[in-house]
Amino acid sequence: MSTREEKNHKQHQAQPEIDEVTNDQILEGHEFDGIRELDNQLPPWLKYLFYASIVFAASYLTLVFVFEDARVIQAKEYQKEMAAYLQEEEIAEEEEKAAPVARTQEEIMASGEATFSKICSVCHGKFGEGLVGPNFTDKYWIHGGSREDMHQTIVTGVIEKGMISYKNLLSERQIQDVITYIKSLQGTNPPNQKAPEGELYDPEPEAGTQS
Amino acid sequence: MELQKFTYDNRITRDFAMATIVWGVVGMLVGLLVALQIFIPEMNFSLEYTTFGRTRPVHTNAVIFAFVGNAIFTAVYYSMPRLLKTSMYSKLLGKIHFWGWQLIIVAAAITLLAGYTSGKEYAELEWPLDVAITLIWVIFGINMFGTILQRRVSHIYVAIWFYIATWVTVAVLHIVNSIEIPYSLMKSYPVYAGIQDALVQWWYGHNAVAFFLTTPFLGLMYYFVPKAANRPIYSYKLSIVHFWSLIFIYIWAGPHHLLYSSLPDWLQALGTTFSIMLIAPSWGGMINGLLTLRGAWDKVRKDPVLKMFVVGITAYGMATFEGPMMSLKTVNAISHFTDWTVGHVHIGALGWNGMLTFGMLYWLIPRLYNTKLYSVKLANAHFWISTLAIIFYAVPLYIGGITQALMWKEFTPEGYLAYPNFLETVTQLIPMYATRAFGGSLYLIGMLMLVFNVIKTAKQGSLVKVEEVEAPALHALPAVKTKSESWHGFLERKPIRFLIFATIAILIGGVFEIIPTYLINSNVPIISSVQPYTPLELQGRDIYVKEGCYNCHSQMIRPFRSETERYGEYSKAGEFIYDHPFQFGSKRTGPDLAREGVKTGPIYKPNAWHYNHFIDPQKMNEGSIMPKYPWLAEKDIDLKSTAPKIRAMKRLGVPYPDNYEHQANDDLLKQAEEIAQNLRDAGIETESTKEIIALIAYIQRLGTDIMKPQVEEEEE
C-alpha cells in the first residue's frame, strides 16, 4: 500500500471506481481502516438552506446594529408592550364607568374566594385560620375590621409585617370582592386557629355589603 | 515494501467501555431520582445530601462527563489506532487518563453531594477538581497527538478532525470558564461577575454541548456507522464543509442562553443569528450519517446497532433544528425557563448520545471479546424500549413547558395576571412530571438490558487483549503542498497545522463576544446605588449557591409585562456587578427571586415567612414541590470563612473598605441579631448564628439596591 499521491498517480489513467449499490464515484485513495468515501457533492437544498440562513442572519444583525429596530431591541419592545397595555386599560376604565355591570352575591363571593385562595391563603391560611398572617375568623383585628380599614390594609400593605401592597396586583373590584369573602369567614371556626391578635372589632354598625 | 508489526491494545478500550456502562447506570439512576424529586418533595428525604439542588448537578455531571465522557474515550481509543495504523502513543498515559478520569468522577459525586459547587451549570466542580480535569485532559491530548504523529497513514480521517477539534475546544472552554480565586481548600469565587460571568459561562455551557456532546460523537459516528453498515461515507466534500462551518459557527451561539436577559442586545443578536446559521452545518453531519446507510437499509431493519444509529442521528437532526428555533426571541420568550428546554436537551442526550453509545457498545463488545452478541433479540428490545422512553420523556415536557409559559403570560380581561400565584402554574405540571419519570424509568430499564447483554456476551467470549497487525511504514511526505493535492488534502496530512487552524476557528467567536463586554463600558451601565453584599448577605449567598437554589430559581426578570407585573422591575446589567458567580439560573421550577427583597414589590415576604418556608415549604404553601431545608436552622454560619471570603472578593475588585475583613464578623453578627430579633417578635425562637439567618439576609437583599436613591452611600 502507499500514500494517496502515489495511488492517484498509479490510477491516473484508470476509470474511477464506482460504488455498486449507489453508482456513486468512490474517492480514490480515501480508505481508512476499510472505510471509504464517496465523491458526492453537497445536496443543493442544504447549500441553499445555508445561504438562506446567512441572509437571515445578515438582515437580523442589520436590524439590530444599524436600525436599532423596536422589534429587536428589547427595551423598546417593552416600552411598546406597556404603552399598548396602558391605552387598553384607559379604554376599559371608561367603559366600566359608562355602564357598570350588576353582579349577584354568588358571583361576588366566587370572585372573592378565588382571590383569597390564590393570594391571601399563602399567609392567612387556607380557611383564614391564620398562619404567618393573623386569623380572619375571630373578631380581633390588628389594623381594623371595617371594610374601609381592610381596604386600606390591602392597598397600602403592612410592609414591616410582610404584607405587601396589592394596589397594582388586584383591581378595585377584586379587592371589594375579597373583603366581602373575608368578612364571610367570621365565626367559621376552622381547625388550627391562630390566637386572636389586635383589638376587638364590633361588626354591628356595618350591616350590609356594597360594592 | 516491508511491513511493520504493531498491536492494537483492546484492554484500554474495554476499560473505557465498562466505565461507560457503569456510569451510565449510575447517571440514569440519579436522573430518575431527580425526576421523582421534582414532583414528590418527600423524595428529597429532608437530608441536605440528597436534596434536588445537589442531586441534579450529580445527574448532569454523571451523564455528561462520566457516561458520555467515557463513551468518547472508548471510541477514540478504539478507532484512532485503527484509522492511523499504529498503537496508541503510550499505554501508561492511557492508564493515567483512564484512572484519573474515573477518580475525578468519584470525587465529583462526593463533593457535589457535600455541597462544594461553583454554582455554574455543568461546571459545578470546585477548583481542585478543575485543576485535575485540566491535567488529565492534557495527558489525553499528549496521548492523542503522540498517536497521530506516529501514524502509518498519510492523511487523517474526518473522525480524527472531530477528535482534534473536541480536544482543543474543551481545553479552552474549561480553562477560561474555570478561572477562579480560591479562598479555602475546596472553595473559590470565579473571577467574572454578573453579566460577564453569565456570558463566559454560557459560552462554555453551550459549547460543552457542542464540543463534548456533539463533535466527538460526530467523530464516533464517522467511524462506527460506516463500519457497522459496511458502506462508504456519503460525501467527503460535505465532511469538509460541515466540519469547518460547524466548529466556527458553534462558538458564537452561546448568548442564546441569555435571550431577554440583561445581556446587551448586540450579543443576544449574535446568539440568535449564529444559531440559525448552525442548522445547515449540523444537518450536514446528519445527512452524511444517514446517507452513508444508502444501500444498507435492509440491514437496518434487522440490526439493532444500525437501528440505534438511525434513531440517534435522527434525534440529532431534530435537536439541531429545534435548538435554533428556540434561539429566536419570539420562541425563546415562551420556551426559556420552562421544561421545554429540559425536553430539548434530552432529545439530544437520550437520542443522540445515548443511542449512538448503545449502538457502538453492541457493535464493539462482541468484537473485543471475539464472539457474537449474546442476544440480538434483547438488543432489539432495548432499541424499542429506549425509543418509546424518549417519547414518553420528551412529549410531556413539551406540553408542560408550553402550558406553564402560557399560564405565566395570561392576563385577565381586567388586565391582571390570571395566575398571580406561581404555585398554580407548577401544580398544573405534576401529571407531566410523573409521565416524564415513567419515560425515564423505561430508558433505565433499557440500559439494564444492555448491562445483562454485555455481561453475557463477555462471559461467552474471551477478551482479545491485543490485536497483532502489520502495515508498511509511512515514508516522508513532501513538506509543501503538491500540485495534485487539494488545499484541504494537504491540511489532512499536516495534523499540527490542522490543530492550529481549528484552534483559530474556535477562538474567533469567543474573542469577538467576550472581550468587548469587558472593554466597552456601555455594555454594563453603572447603577451607583448598587453596593457590595454585607458579610452576612455574602455568607447567605454562598449558602444559596451551596444548596443549588439556582437549579430551580432564576434571578433574571425579563422585560415582559407579564414578568414585571409578577416580579417587579426587570433586571438590569448593572445590578449584578458584585455577583461572583452570577445566579441567573436557567429554569423556573420555582418563581424568580431577583426582586424577592423589594418591600414595595409584588413578591415580598416577611422574614418569618421565609424562616417557616425554608423549614417546611408545604406548611406555607400546600402543594409546594420545594424540598424542606431543616438543617439551615441547625447549622451555624462558618464565621471563620468570613475574612478569607472578603479578602478574595477584594482581590476580585469588590470595593470593601480597607481592612474590612477584620471588622466583617462584627457587622455580620449585628445584622444577624437584628433579623433574629425580628423573628422572635414574630414568635420564632432562633439563634442569630444559624445559616438560615444568613440566607434570609441574602434573600431580603435581592433586587433592592436599584430601589435606593442613586447616590453613593455607606453600606451598613
Image (cartoon, rainbow, N blue to C red):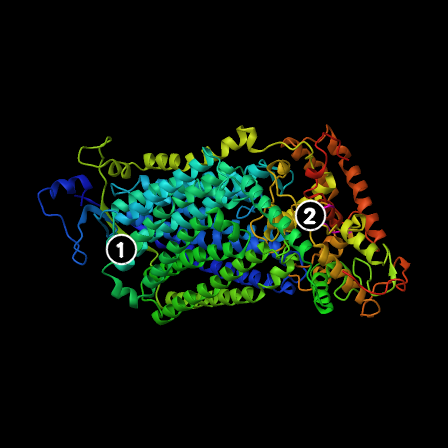
Left or right for B417, reference B444: right
**Quadrant of residue A83 within the rendered picture:** top right
Q: Is residue A80 magenta?
A: no
Q: Quadrant of residue B146?
A: top left
Q: Position of residue B202 (x, y in %)?
A: 51, 43
In the foreground, B5 or B495: B495
Amino acid carrying label 2: it is: Glu
Q: In this view, does B595 lie above or below B577?
A: below
The answer to whether any part of residue B554 appears in the image is no
* Crowdedness near tag 1: few (<14), some (14–19) or many (≥20) residues, C-alpha within 10 Å: many
Q: Specify the amino acid type for callout 1.
A: Thr
Q: Which of B582 and B365 is in front in this view?
A: B582
Q: Foreground residue, B185 or B458?
A: B185
Callouts 1 and 2 in the same chain? yes
Task: Identify residue for label 1.
Answer: B292
Q: Magenta residues, as a range? A: B599-607
Give the mark nearest the N terminus, 1 or 2. Answer: 1
User: Residue B27's x, y, as percent?
Assistant: 51, 58
| Occupied quadrant, residue B482 | top left
Callout 1–callout 2 Cβ contact below 8 Å:
no
> Left or right of B616: which side holds B460?
left
Judged from the image, the secondary structure of the residue bearing numbered disc 2 is: loop
Q: Where is residue B56 in the image (x, y as percent from the top left)?
A: 57, 55
**Residue extending farthest left:** A13
Identify the residue at horizontal 65%, vertical 46% (top origin): B594
For residue B596, the mark is 2
